[in-house]
Amino acid sequence: MSNRLLISNVTIVNDTDLPFKGDVFIANGRIMKVGNELFDQAEQYIDGKGKDWLLFPGYIDMHIHGSAGSDVMDATEQALHQMSRSLVQEGVTGFLATTMTQATDTIEQALKTIAQFENDGDEATLLGVHVEGPYVSPKRAGAQPVDYMILPSIEQFAYWQQLSHNRIKQITVAPELEGGIAFIKALHKQGVIVSIGHSDATFEEVDRAVAVGVRQATHLYNQMRPFHHRNPGVVGGVLLENAVKVEIIADFVHCHPMSIQLAYRLKGAAGIILITDAMRAKGLQYGNYDLGGQTVHVTASGAHLPNGALAGSILTMEQAVKNMKAVTNCSLSELVAMSSANAAQQLQLRSKGRIAAGFDADVILLDQQLNVEKTICRGKVVFEKS
């Protein structure tokens, strides 16, 4: 394995600085130097001269269920490896393995598998778990099976966290459920990201939940009480609460392009996290697939249950970033914020989401159309466009 890599003549993009032309020297999986005309000796050289390449921090997907035929709820290490390997093709260098509402023992099996899981060198890093359900509202079920929805339990969550070896980083909860507020308060104190989602809460209930620790909103607009001018609902609440960052599935299926534009204008790039919410059909042919024991029809118009409800997406982070740019004409620095830096900040990953000395060497090379040319995880080139 080559330890040292020198990337030169690329435009380096971070969330808070102006992009600049420069070089990056990487050794032992870390960024050692960022500057102009670096001449450090390396085993591998990537020269962007004449290519107009951009260098972004690797994408972080905080909400993904599956990819390439595998799903987190398969509860096998093979499924997690398959997902991790496939994600580097779209520029993802880190992700949260996302569970869904299922029988308690099924969720627990997935958590046990994740607790033991270790990534191979050519994969996106599994950064932790996002538990989506079962503490959610039957009124806003979407593709979460109502039969398995239960009330929030601090004791049960503590057991799950133990099973996962403390890998649960985020949980989606409906705060209006009985015990919801106490649950949010407890988890916020533990450092878990509490995200409001699959919720029928009123604006006032959202306000109260944010006061005790809600800091994120799961797939904005989808499966949450919509905005009404006499009841702003969850949508109005999370758009107005500065403490809350909103996840957006920018596939133009889950939300209209102008709804994405609205969120961008209200939240700014600092308040948005691009996610895919992808299921196992991502990267595969259209057809019928399984999601939590339910048949999902995947076509050009997205992934749907037989009743028409959306069942996750087949979106890639590469396409999400392109779509966000197309709709908002945001800056490249803002794209970095929405695709990696904000997620790293939420997850308190102090060495990810930025191209600077001392940070992990998780970076991606993009062309001017934002196509992924190369993905570098922990200093190793793990994907190159053929």
Image (cartoon, helix red, strand yellow):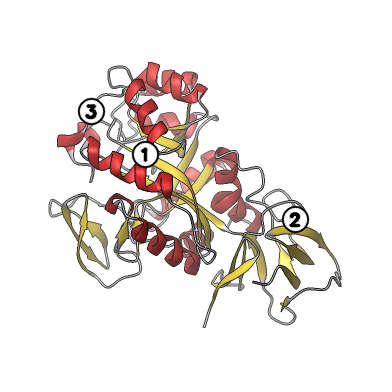
Q: Secondary structure at mark 2?
A: loop
Residue occupying image coordinates x 74% and y 64%: 26
Residue corresponding to mark 2: 18
Q: Could you say which quadrant of the image residue 380 lies in?
A: bottom right
Amino acid type for the residue under numbered disc 2: Leu
Q: Are marks 3 and 2 in contact (CB under 8 Å)?
A: no
Give how far across and how far down residue 39 sits, in percent.
Answer: 86, 72
Q: Secondary structure at mark 1?
A: strand
**Which mark sits nearer the N-terminus, 3 or 2?**
2
Residue corresponding to mark 3: 150
Q: Are marks 1 and 2 in contact (CB under 8 Å)?
A: no
Give how far across and how far down residue 80 sits, in percent.
Answer: 38, 57
Give how far across and how far down residue 384 sits, in percent.
Answer: 55, 77
Q: Secondary structure at mark 3?
A: loop
Q: Nearer the viewer, residue 351 or 47?
A: 351
Amino acid type for the residue under numbered disc 3: Ile
- Quote the CA–CA distance across marks 1 and 2: 36 Å
Q: Residue furthest front?
A: 116
Residue 330's place in the image compared with 385, above or below, is: above
Residue occupying image coordinates x 66% and y 68%: 54
**Which mark sits nearer the N-terminus, 1 or 2?**
2
Q: Could you say which quadrant of the image residue 173 lies in?
A: top left
Q: Residues within 10 Å of mark 3 (few under 14, many from 20)?
A: some
Residue corresponding to mark 1: 131
- Quote the CA–CA distance across marks 3 and 2: 47 Å
Residue 281's place in the image compared with 229, above or below, is: below
